[in-house]
Image: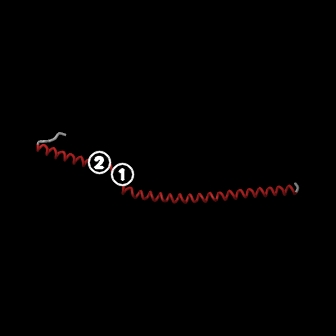
Amino acid sequence: MDWQTVSTLGAFGGVLIGAVKWILEKHLTQLDKRFESLEVVIRNDVTALKQIERDLMELKVALPREYVMRADWIHFSGVIDAKLDSIHNKVQNIAEGGCAKRGHCESD
């Protein structure tokens, strides 16, 4: 090999190395930008997650104060229904007793 071939190969190798270096730097710059945008998204997500956690804790505090569990409501309504039935029976007994004394009961 003569010196012209060596210098041509050296120049071509230098250009090739420079091009690869330029492409890698450009790629690294793009990656840095993408990572920065991902960091912003992650920070926003963390903020949103903290807000959701706060809202959930507030709901956990509010639920026992403002809402009744289904089983408790069923029990409560059963007690109220029994009391209303008892009152109805007493009123009906009083009405039947008063009507029988007066002698003019209307049929049901």
The spot of residue 96 in percent (x, y) is 16, 44
Mark 2 element type: helix
Is the C-beta separation of discs 1 and 2 under 8 Å? Answer: no
**Quarter of the image where one finds residue 16:** bottom right
Helix, strand or loop at label 1? It is loop
Q: Which residue is mark 1?
A: 69
Looking at this rendering, what residue extends furthest in the right direction? 2
Which residue is denoted by mark 2 in the rendering? 78
On-image quarter of the N terminus: bottom right
Q: Residue at x 11, y 42 (%)?
A: 103
Instruction: Point out residue 80 in the picture as x, y percentages from the top left corner.
Output: 27, 49
Which residue is depicted at the point 52% across and 59% down? 46
Q: Quadrant of residue 56?
A: bottom left
Along the viewing direction, whichever of 56 and 107 lies nearer the viewer: 107
> Which of disc 2 and disc 1 is earlier in sequence?
1
On residue 11, which mark appears? none
